[in-house]
Image: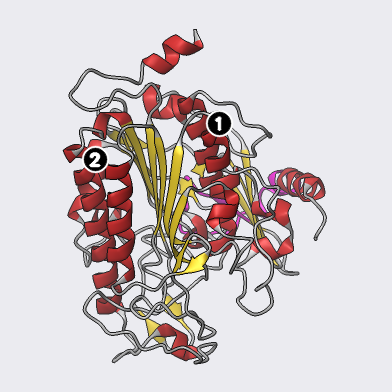
Amino acid sequence: MACLALLAFSRCSSAPEHVKPNFVVILADDLGYGDIATYGSVRNTTPHLDRMAREGLRFSDFHSNGPMCTPTRASLLTGLYPHRFGQQFESALSGIEDYDIGLPLEAVTIPETLASAGYVSGMYGKWHLGYHPPYMPIDQGFDDFRGLASGDGDHHSHIDRSGRPDWWHNQELAPEEGYGVNLITQHSVDFIKRHRDKPFFLYVAHLAIHFPWQGPDDSGYRVEGGNYHNLSKLGELDSLDVSSNVNKMIEAVDRSVGSILETLREQGLEEDTLVIFTSDNGGYLTYQGGYHNISENGPLRGQKTDVYEGGHRVPAIAWWPGKITPGVSHDLAATFDIMPTLFELAGVASPNASDGTSLASLLLDREPLASRTLFWRIRSETAVRKGKWKLVQIGNDGPELYDLDEDLGESRDLSDTHPDIVLALEEELSAWADSLQPER
């Protein structure tokens, strides 16, 4: 029976027939819920993502597992809440305090598990789960890696916030000239062409639209030995209104998606390949120093770093011509669902239990997901989501309760009128917190 199920993914064509599908996961950085046209943006032109959404399944209720970079990336690759790896993974790994740690090597990742089923895995772009060996993608199962290890490098000079060169090939620094989005795209396209004859997992992790806010035609400004742990990290900007800078970055990411999808078509692989596009957290709306018009989070409250919806509800699109029927899903889903989804579709068993759930039946048969409770925590802020209800706790302030079906913008606190729901969600939050691994 298992063999028959796997054979269902093959097809007759001039392209190589794959018993197992290919997987491409494209992760944008800091892309807000309303930053692309198919999610309501009127200032950014994103024809390739719009086409991907028309031809695939667009999620309206998809969430990153953290409102910052590192936690979501850890969850994507492991299928687990990032908190299971220690408190450092609730937020972004610092290039100072966390320079010598990384995702624990004993963590079981997507590429490590898929390798047992004959997959080759490549990653191109931003890692941010360790700053140097032995905490690099190659140490976590990828066969090839090119990109940056840190959380934000200059998109042109590839110098990190601490003034260190930060463009790697596997475990060695390997500088390349060019705009980060374009280099990531080039290596991703080359990977597809090189490995068209066997199943592959490709992880495309863009640094854009994370600061420094630089477009393809800007120049690099960071130099080796410099210190950019201040507002200079944002880039050489002519205005506090950075919408034009970010617009160019979003459109560069859109062109990258178009190049990858076109390569799959040219190689005859589009019906053999599941492509998932999403973001690692919500977008910044404003930033200290008066910077504004950065990103768009649509009707959502809050921004990156917040546990309100604007911090973690993100765009997400699944594309697989001939397998996924075009449409919109309103099911509640999250980044850590990607790992079990890929494993089910590849016909491999996960060595460990996952906190996420497979989306395979939703993608292929539009079967609704079972109800569940999701949790977010960053520093002293927590949030719990179950069905339409969301509980938010900010520091020592009283709990806030929102009905997201009626109040997506989280503007009407209903905690006083529904104390029973508050108590039930608080009990689930407490049980979840108790289940996490103690701080390392």
Residue pictured at 27% horizontal, 52% vertical: 257
Magenta span: predominant SS is: loop
Q: Give 33 or 262, whichever is nearer the viewer.
A: 262
Identified by mark 2, the residue type is: Leu
Visible residue check, residue 327? yes
Task: Residue under label 1, please give it.
Answer: 116
**Magenta-highlighted residues:** 401-423
Q: Is residue 422 left or right of residue 28?
A: right
Q: Give 162 or 43, whichever is nearer the viewer.
A: 162
Residue 222 at what x, y percent from top left? 41, 87
* N-terminal label among 1 and 2: 1
Nearer to us of marks 1 and 2 is 1
Identified by mark 1, the residue type is: Ser
Residue pictured at 82% horizontal, 55% vertical: 438
Disc number placed over residue 264 in the picture, else none: 2
Query: Quick check: marks 1 and 2 in contact, CB under 8 Å?
Result: no
Residue pictured at 38% horizontal, 61% vertical: 206
Q: Give 414 or 98, whichever is nearer the viewer.
A: 98
Element marked by disc 2: helix
Visible residue check, residue 289? no
Residue 224 at what x, y percent from top left? 46, 88
Answer above or below: position of 6 versus 207: above
